[in-house]
Image (spheres, rainbow, N blue to C red):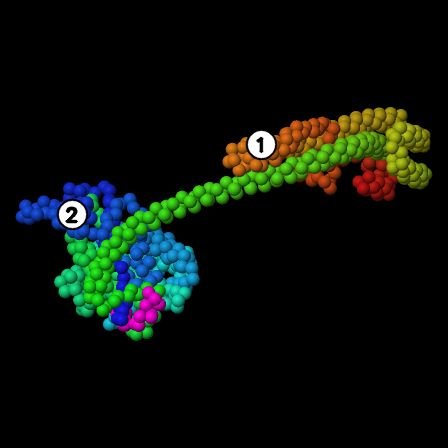
Amino acid sequence: RLITLLTQSSLNSARVIVCIRDKNNVDTDKCERVDVLPDNTLKVRRLKVPSIKNTSKVYGPFNRILDSNVNYQRIFYEAVKVHVDEGFNGIKSFVLSYGFSNSRKNDILFGSDPKELSGVFKETLEYINLKKSQNVGSNVDLCFSVFELCGDKIFDLLSDFRKEISIVSDDDNKLVLRDPVVLPMPDLKTVCNTICDALNKKSYASNTNFEVVPRSHVLVKLNIVTKSKSGVINYGEIVFVNLSYEKLIMNPQDKQFNSEIKAAKLGYVSLHACLEQILKNPQLSQSFRDSTLTRILRPALSGSYTSSMIFTVTTENVPSDATQALDIADKYRRLKCCSHKESLVSLEVRRKTKNIWIPLCDIKEAETMGFVSINTESRNSIQTFHQEIEENKKRLQECTDVLSKIEIDLEESFKICNEKNLQRDSCIKAKHDAINDLAKINCENCELKSKVDKLKVEIANLLDKRAILEETCSKYFDKLEKSKSKGICLLEKSSSLDKARTEMNDFLSSQVKDMENNNLKVQNMIKDLMNKHKIFIKELDDQNCQDKNNFQQIEIVLKNYGDKLDVYSNEIQRCIKDRLPVDVRNELHDKLTRVYNELLVAIEKARKTCEAHGEKCFSCIEKIIEEERKKIVNFFSDYKECLLKEISNTQEAISTNDKCTMEIEVAQKDINDVKKILEEVNSIETPSIDLTLLNPPSSKEYVVDENAIPEDLPKFSPSEKPTVINEILSVTKKIFGSDHRNTLQDEGNKENL
């Protein structure tokens, strides 16, 4: 028996899908208008011209006319999906984007955002990934390449420097380019980023070498290689072409730019003429030497590839070249397609697979590979078979339309199901998060209880430290009082001695000249006095270090010292009584009395100054203690606010959990237990602290802020000596010599230490 195998595409003619794009803020009285008729035709109403009677023309019918509110997914299902499905079966296809000027036809394929890929091509990539995952058991390899036609030149956009390439002539009517860059498709995100980078290299972005910017066309070629379980390898191909059509203003003096403009115009003129010639004489072999654009479209124009055109129309703003564009679309829809499946067998025999003679035993194996068997012995069966093929094609077209709608509904239902699943997952996740939050809250409450216990212990420790600090402060106050008394005694002692010495030295140096014989006696007495003075100072220092209450003893010693000094003075007066007149002695006695009174006044003034400085120092210390006390109060108040805030957040979490679905009711018992625990936490009394009894922490545990200490603290400085004391010192120096001055300096250094 004779069996014939047919492996051709289900589409026997080119398809034109019209997409309407309306524009706002357009004066419709000054431009043509396009009306959409019910039979999928377009009617162009021109401006009324008196010389022309018929001012309208009808184009179509087209395969489908889509409204302006449709999305890219709907356009994909109407125009591109059938070509993707056939591409997995080894069929080659063309998808063209064409339309009116300024109709945003460039956004149909690739979108309007230069940083992100969108449009029909993005929907195609998503559908290819979905279909690839559904072909279980079949191995699918995908690769792509991107080109640009600018004038009569072709550039590879995937190369680094937009390398210019050329078309290879092929007798089999295929689109073959010389040495292109072909990249695999690892994942959707990488492919989208790569194609975006390639599109950004177009001539409108670079604009070099006088390229025709508005008339550049973009080609994206997708190769689909599938290998089935039975070992059959199919080679499919989808070519996306973005045809731009705009007017250009030419500069007559720029010859190179004019040549590019003419080449671009020649492409559309030759396309129009080529379509008209093919429709008049439909043959597979046609001449494509007119322009590069028609040579690129040769597989679609010759019928070797199945093709679809997405034609963009603006109904409210119709340009003057609308009739020419509609003529091309109207002629394009009448192209006949006879694309055949390309598999490994067709590549090996290097010809199209039309009719193959096979034995009867291999029919089942051929049918598994996608071939259709025909019995050639009966002519009637062949005729009926062809009739059935035509009927099946019509039914297939109807089923394809219904299937596209069903698939759109299915996609929407999938989206709804996915949204519901996401909501369900979010509810389950919220439930688990709520349970975890409750567990965390329990742990935090336990930690807070332990922290409260620790704080109680720390407060007790602080109270103990406060008692210790009070004892230390009392000791320091006692030491300060003793230091004040010691300073007063030393001041009285030194000032009285200096006064007596100064007065005696003045009078003896001015009036006594014959005391040379008695001077040795006086010096010996002075030396004894100095020794006794040193012994007295040493005993006084020892008593100050050992006995804390030695103030009275110092007064007694001072009194004894004054008596001795009076004795020595009486002896000196007795020695010089015979030589000094009475009036001189009285004058000396008056001066000594006056010096003594002034010394008492100076001592009282110094004592009051010390008391004032001490009170100021104590007030500064109290101020520092009060500031640190305020810091501790703020610390405990902040801690209390944080604790109350955590409790309020816990109560809000419980009220939110009460609004959950029925699934959370299973954990209601645990939530009630948690509520009880939280009520116990709310009932915890915040410990009240008497901050007046609070002892500040030690220097190791707490660091005092340096800025809290005022800079104007009182400084204890030695009081200035009255002028009378300076006079007594000068007299003492003249009487006792220069050794007494060195002794006083040594004692002063000891006091400073």
Q: Which residue is mark 2?
A: 43
**Residue 273, position as x, y percentages in the image:** 15, 62
Give the camera-side residue of 497 and 710: 710
Query: Which of the 4 image quarters holds residue 26?
Result: top left
Quarter holding the N terminus? Answer: bottom left
Identify the residue at horizontal 51%, vertical 33% (top origin): 659
Identify the residue at horizontal 19%, vertical 45% (top origin): 38
**Residue 721, position as x, y percentages in the image:** 77, 33
Residue 318 visible in the shown view: no
Q: Is 617 on the left-hand or right-hand side of 571? A: left
The local secondary structure at tag 2 comes to strand
Q: Is 58 on the left-hand or right-hand side of 405? A: left
Q: Which residue is mark 1?
A: 651
Give the camera-side residue of 373 and 113: 373
Earlier-in-chain disc, 1 versus 2: 2
Q: Amino acid at mark 1?
A: Gln
Start-end of magenta stretch: 351-367
Q: Amino acid at mark 2?
A: Lys
